[in-house]
């Protein structure tokens, strides 16, 4: 199982730690940035499934995974699928924002 860095607020909740020597902010370090769209899509779909199973289908982490898939689908020319995924992500974020405002 992927683990967060020690002390990370989500430690033990499936966040990946960057490999030794890798700069996570360095462009070209992900399959999507390297143009490996099929590999990126597979990884993001796996992350989406894990997030849905872990947190439920309407959690903000799911929206983030959906947003990553939107980028891959757009890069692959899958515009209609990207629109559907984006709409789902936006609905989750809107629901979260509404809930946050209601708590104030």
Image (spheres, rainbow, N blue to C red):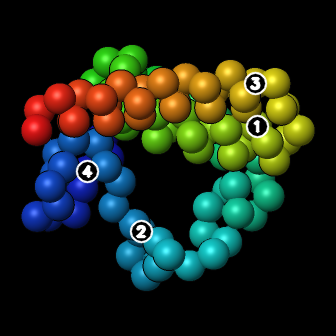
| Of callouts 2 and 3, the N-terminal one | 2
| Of callouts 3 and 4, the N-terminal one | 4
Q: Which residue is mark 2?
A: 19
Residue 100 vs residue 56, the one in the foreground: 100
Secondary structure beneath disc 3? helix
Secondary structure beneath disc 4? loop
Q: Quadrant of residue 59?
A: top left
* Residue drawn where x is 10% and y is 64% of the image: 7
Q: Are marks 3 and 1 in contact (CB under 8 Å)?
A: yes
16 up-or-down from 44: above or below: below
Mark 2 or mark 3, which is nearer to you? 3
Mark 3 Cα shell of 10 Å, populated few (<14), some (14-19), many (≥20): some
Q: Which residue is mark 3?
A: 81
* Residue drawn where x is 58% and y is 44% of the image: 68
Left or right: where 9 falls relative to 80: left
Q: Tell me where residue 78 appears, x and y as whole percent.
A: 84, 32
| Of callouts 4 and 2, the N-terminal one | 4
Q: Which residue is mark 4?
A: 3
Mark 2 Cα shell of 10 Å, populated few (<14), some (14-19), many (≥20): few
Mark 4 Cα shell of 10 Å, populated few (<14), some (14-19), many (≥20): some
| Of callouts 3 and 1, the N-terminal one | 1
Quote the CA–CA distance across marks 4 and 2.
12 Å
Q: Tell me where residue 17 appears, x and y as whole percent.
A: 33, 61
Quote the CA–CA distance across marks 3 and 1.
7 Å
Q: Which residue is mark 1?
A: 73
| Of callouts 1 and 4, the N-terminal one | 4
Left or right: where 50 falls relative to 6: right
């Amino acid at each position: 199982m992927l683990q967060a860095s020690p002390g990370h607020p989500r430690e033990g909740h499936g966040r990946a730690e960057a490999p030794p020597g890798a700069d996570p902010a360095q462009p070209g370090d992900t399959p999507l940035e390297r143009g490996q769209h099929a590999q990126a899509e597979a990884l993001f779909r796996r992350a989406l499934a894990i997030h849905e199973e872990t947190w439920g289908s309407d959690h903000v982490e799911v929206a983030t995974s959906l947003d990553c898939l939107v980028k891959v689908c757009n890069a692959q020319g899958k515009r209609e699928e990207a629109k559907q995924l984006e709409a789902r992500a936006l609905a989750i974020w809107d629901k979260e924002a509404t809930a946050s405002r209601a708590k104030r």
